[in-house]
Image (spheres, rainbow, N blue to C red):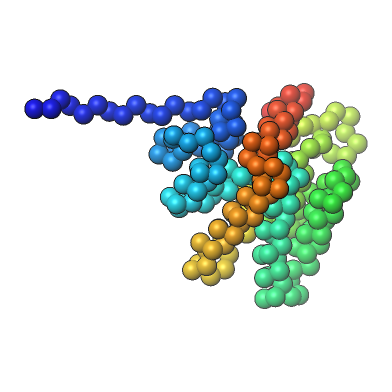
Amino acid sequence: MTGPTATPRPFPLPDAATPMGFLIRRAALQKLWHSVGAATDDPAVLVERLMAKEKPVDAVRCIAVCVPARQAIWWAWVSARHLVTAEVAAEPTEQDARLHLLGVVEEWITTPQDAKRREAWDAAQILGLDHPVALSAAAVWFSGGSIAPLGAAIPVQAPAGMAASFVAAAVCGACLPGDHKLLPDRWRGSIAQGLEIITRLGGWPVSIKYARQEFEGETATPGAA
C-alpha cells in the first residue's frame, strides 16, 4: 500500500523587491500566481500563460503597471485611436468630441504640460468616462501633478498607480467593440503593441525599474494615497 498523497505546497510569491514581485502585486495577481505564474521569474512567460488561459484583461494589466506613465498612455491612445477611426468611418458626423479629445491626449504625449493635462480631463468629463479615449485622458490627468482645481492653495496628489489603471481600462475597452469573432485577434494585437513598448524601453527589468521609480515616487509624495 502507498501512503496518502502529500498536498503540494503553494509556490511562494516572489519577493516584492524583485521585478516579478513588483508586477504580481501591482497587477493584483496574487490569487492567480500559483496556477499561472508559479515557477517562472519571466514576466513575458507570465503574460503568455495568462493569454493561454484566456485572461487577456490580466495580461493587459501586467503590461500597464510595468510601463512608465507616458509610454503607457501612448499605448492607450493608440488603442483608442483605432476605435475612434472605426467609429468615424461608421458615423462621421457624430465623433467630433472624441476626435478632439484624441488630439488633446496626443498633444500631451508630445509635450506633457499641466495646461494640456487639465484640458484633457475637462474634455473627458464632458464626453463621459465610458469610452477608451476618455479613459486615456483620465490616465493623463492622474499621471502626475495636482488634481485639485486650478489655483487651489493646497495641491492634491492622485492615488499612486491610478494612471496605469486607466491605461489598462482604455486598452481593454478599445478591444471589446466590433465583431466578436475578431476579439482574440484584437487582444493579441493590443498585447503585442504593449510588449513592443517594453522591448523598446530595454526589456522587462528596465521597464519595471522605471515604472517602480514612478510608483514609489507617487507613494512618497505627501498627500498621495
Q: Is residue 191 visible?
A: yes
Measured from the top left, where is residue 87 in percent x and y?
68, 70
Q: Residue at x 70, y 28 (%)?
A: 216
When the figure is inspected, residue 15 is found, relative to residue 84, above or below; the finding is: above
Quadrant occupied by the C terminus: top right
Number of marks in picture: 0
In the picture, measured across the screen, residue 50 lies left or right of residue 7, that is: right
- Viewer-proximal residue, 67 or 90? 67
Q: Residue at x 82, y 36 (%)?
A: 145
Measured from the top left, where is residue 80 in percent x and y?
69, 59
Measured from the top left, where is residue 33 in percent x and y?
45, 36
Quadrant occupied by the N terminus: top left
When the figure is inspected, residue 180 is found, relative to residue 15, above or below; the finding is: below
Q: Residue at x 74, y 28 (%)?
A: 217
Which of the 4 quarters of the picture holds residue 28?
top right
Measured from the top left, where is residue 11 in percent x and y?
41, 29
In the picture, measured across the screen, residue 10 lies left or right of residue 145, that is: left
Which of the 4 quarters of the picture holds residue 172?
bottom right
- Viewer-proximal residue, 49 or 180? 49
Q: Is residue 139 visible?
A: no
In the picture, measured across the screen, residue 215 lies left or right of residue 60, that is: right
Which of the 4 quarters of the picture holds residue 123?
bottom right
Point out the residue furthest to the left here.
Answer: 1
Point out the residue furthest to the right here.
Answer: 151
- Viewer-proximal residue, 21 or 91? 21
Q: Residue at x 67, y 76 (%)?
A: 90
When the figure is inspected, residue 82 is found, relative to residue 119, above or below; the finding is: below
